[in-house]
Image (cartoon, rainbow, N blue to C red):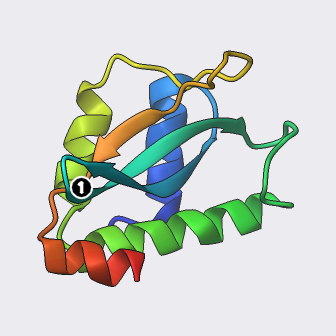
Amino acid sequence: DEFNGYALRDLIFYKWGECYDVEFQRVDSYGFQSVYLNIMPFRLGRRPFRHETEFDYLCHLQAVVEILVKYNQIEYVLAQLNETTKKPRAGTSPLIAVPLRLDLTPEQVEKILG
């Protein structure tokens, strides 16, 4: 079976008991750019949450999975997701996201970030 947005939602829920949002983030460090997939502490059915419906959330997760598959990062990200002991937390300053690093070439980073 092909990994998809539903499977990512299920993994996130299994790991933390909530359907957390995810987003890509650029990180500049020592002159290099990296991309992380952050598990954000924003939960389906709670405010604030940028997706109006569960379907919108699933479409977003599917798009994220397609990017991860395109750049051959799905296994790498899933391994980090399974191994992390961190938990997304809102209500802290700053809020706590769980960063999952992508292993990309500089050319791939440029394509993703534009």
Residue 80, position as x, y percentages in the image: 24, 37
* Towards the viewer: 22 or 1: 22
**Which quadrant of the view contains residue 50?**
bottom right
Please state the horizontal and vertical placement of residue 59, each as a whole percent of the image.
Answer: 63, 72
Of the 4 image quadrants, the one containing the C terminus is: bottom left
Going by the picture, which residue comes out furthest to the front? 31
How far from the left and from the top, in percent, is residue 19? 63, 40
Q: Residue at x 75, y 43 (%)?
A: 44
Q: Quadrant of the N terminus?
A: bottom left
The residue sitting at the left extreme is 105
Residue 79: give x, y in percent of width and height: 20, 40
Q: Residue at x 45, y 28 (%)?
A: 15
Label 1 SS: loop
Quadrant location of residue 34? bottom left
Seen at 54% across and 50% down, the residue is 22
Pointer 1: what residue? 102
Q: Image quarter for residue 13?
A: top right
The answer to whether residue 102 of the structure is visible from this angle is: yes
